[in-house]
């Protein structure tokens, strides 16, 4: 069933189209750019996420009778604009940073080229997807680094809206999480799902032992038993007594996790359960994960913090007109000059400058030639790489960036781009971007 995304937008996007059609400027060739002026939370880098979801949403950006009837009844736009919207199909080009790529202030994350009306109408949709998904991916990436190779599972569905939960699971997986608790994310995106039991399952039974016996009977010994409903030490002893020393894992959801994890590990080993793993939950963020990385914890379950971007639930991205054609068909740069909200006009291409060891030094943004161009008169080609890729050509979406294939590409892109960053990028303290952005 086709589900339209056309009304996932702000009222003024359509009134601008209405006015531009009346003024005869709606078809003027224009270039919009999505970027962040700064990195939220004073992070050292950001992570692009949501691109695949946006491309899928653009393919569904159609004004069916239901949407047109609503606009007509509410008198949002004129009858002639209703007719224009009925035939709307994005027919331009979209370039951008591939999903999973790291970014910095001023990075042109998306470049949308088409008529003014075609491009402006996508503003809210692009920002709502990219802002949220990138915030989650940025937080998740920091957590993955903090975990020092130990796996993390996303478990934040109950801490955000129901559809945001699915998007968050996808973004966290792109940034390196290994699984999610959200079944819809598993169905929609092929993300591995996991989960066993909550405290309510233990409380349902007359004793902790009976709860453990029921879980083992259902799932076998390679399951994870929640041991802190009552007394943790007794929970460990009961778990091993019921499941034996080949119990898969125990989960701890309370207490001073660093201390408790060490005590649980020592107790498990003393009982002969040396292969039983320890997983911890309980309001973890990148800082607590980092503190626990050297402890005998084997894996982490992160909920609230990841789905709210660990305190920065949006990346502060904006979507601005940066160039348009004049009456002679020549490109003219345009930019805002507002205090603290200035933008850099012009058609841009991007290369990341690397040192001789392949470590990123700076983001080079070239003005004038456009996203598909090759900078002329420069000597950086051999020590840099092209960043931008084309997602849409003549209205046709490159399907490799969508669906499960797009997610796999994004995970690999993230691993590669993180590996390029200087060591300072991995600091969890607030600070300046890891590399500078230069305009040329």
Image: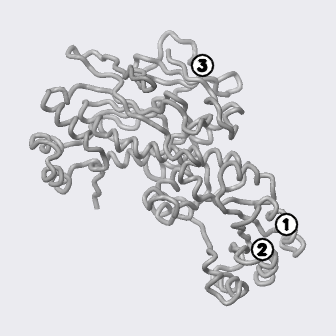
Furthest residue toward right = 270
Q: CA distance from mark 1 to mark 2?
A: 10 Å
Foreground label between 3 and 1: 1
Label 1 CA crowd tier, 10 Å (few <14, some 14–19, many 20+): some
Nearer the N terminus, badge 3 or badge 2? 2
Q: How is the image coloured?
A: one colour
Q: As displayed, is residue 246 above or below residue 156? A: below
Q: What residue did someone put label 3 on?
A: 382
Q: Secondary structure at mark 2?
A: helix
Of labels 1 and 2, earlier in sequence is: 2
Q: Tell me which residue sits at (21%, 42%) in the image.
A: 88
Label 2 belongs to which residue? 232
Q: Which mark is residue 263?
A: 1
Left or right of 213? Residue 40 is: left
| Residue 236, x across and y down, in percent | 79, 76
Identify the image quadrant of residue 332.
top left
Disc 3 versus disc 2: distance between alpha carbons?
58 Å
Extreme-bottom residue of the structure: 206
CB-based contact (under 8 Å), mark 3 and mark 2:
no
**Residues packed near mark 3 inside 10 Å, few (<14), some (14 to 19) or many (20 plus):** few
Q: How many marks?
A: 3
Is residue 396 rendered to the left or right of residue 203? Answer: left
| Earlier residue among tags 3 and 1 | 1
User: Could you say whether the residue bearing mark 1 is in a helix, strand or loop?
Assistant: helix
Spatial separation of the CA atoms under disc 3 and disc 1: 54 Å
In this rendering, the answer to whether 68 lies above or below 183 is above
Give the quarter of the image for residue 264: bottom right
């Amino acid at each position: 069933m086709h589900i339209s995304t056309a009304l996932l937008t702000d009222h003024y996007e359509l009134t601008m189209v209405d006015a531009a059609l009346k003024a005869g400027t709606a078809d003027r060739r224009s270039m919009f750019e999505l970027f962040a002026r700064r990195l939220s939370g004073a992070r050292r880098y950001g992570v692009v996420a949501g691109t695949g979801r946006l491309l899928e949403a653009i393919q569904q950006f159609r004004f069916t009778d239901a949407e047109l009837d609503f606009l007509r009844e509410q008198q949002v736009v004129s009858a002639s604009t209703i007719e224009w919207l009925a035939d709307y199909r994005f027919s331009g080009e979209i370039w951008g940073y591939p999903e999973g790529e790291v970014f910095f202030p001023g990075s042109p994350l998306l470049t949308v080229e088409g008529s003014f009306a075609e491009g402006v109408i996508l503003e809210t949709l692009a920002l709502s997807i990219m802002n949220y998904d990138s915030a989650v991916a940025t937080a998740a990436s920091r957590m993955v680094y903090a975990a020092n190779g130990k796996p993390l599972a996303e478990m934040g569905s109950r801490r955000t809206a129901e559809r945001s939960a699915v998007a968050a699971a996808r973004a966290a997986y792109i940034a390196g999480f290994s699984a999610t608790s959200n079944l819809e994310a598993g169905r929609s995106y092929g993300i591995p799902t996991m989960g066993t039991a909550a405290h309510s399952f233990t409380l349902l039974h007359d004793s902790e032992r009976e709860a453990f016996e029921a879980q083992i009977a259902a799932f076998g010994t390679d399951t994870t038993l929640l041991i802190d409903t009552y007394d943790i030490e007794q929970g460990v002893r009961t778990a091993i007594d019921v499941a034996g020393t080949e119990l898969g894992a125990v989960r701890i959801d309370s207490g001073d996790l660093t201390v408790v994890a060490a005590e649980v590990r020592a107790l498990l080993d003393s009982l002969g359960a040396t292969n039983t793993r320890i997983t911890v939950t309980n309001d973890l963020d990148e800082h607590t994960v980092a503190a626990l990385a050297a402890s005998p914890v084997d894996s982490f379950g992160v909920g609230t913090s990841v789905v709210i971007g660990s305190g920065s639930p949006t990346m502060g991205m904006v979507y601005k007109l940066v160039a348009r054609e004049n009456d002679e068909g020549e490109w003219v740069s345009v930019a805002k000059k507002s205090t603290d909200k200035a933008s850099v006009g012009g058609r841009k291409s991007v290369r990341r400058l690397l040192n001789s060891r392949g470590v990123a030094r700076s983001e080079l943004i070239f003005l004038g030639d456009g996203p598909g161009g090759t900078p002329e008169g420069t000597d950086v080609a051999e020590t840099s790489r092209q960043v931008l890729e084309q997602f849409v050509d003549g209205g046709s979406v490159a399907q490799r960036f969508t669906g499960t294939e797009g997610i796999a590409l994004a995970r690999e892109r993230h691993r590669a781009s993180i590996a390029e960053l200087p060591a300072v990028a991995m600091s969890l303290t607030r600070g300046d971007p890891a590399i500078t952005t230069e305009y040329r």
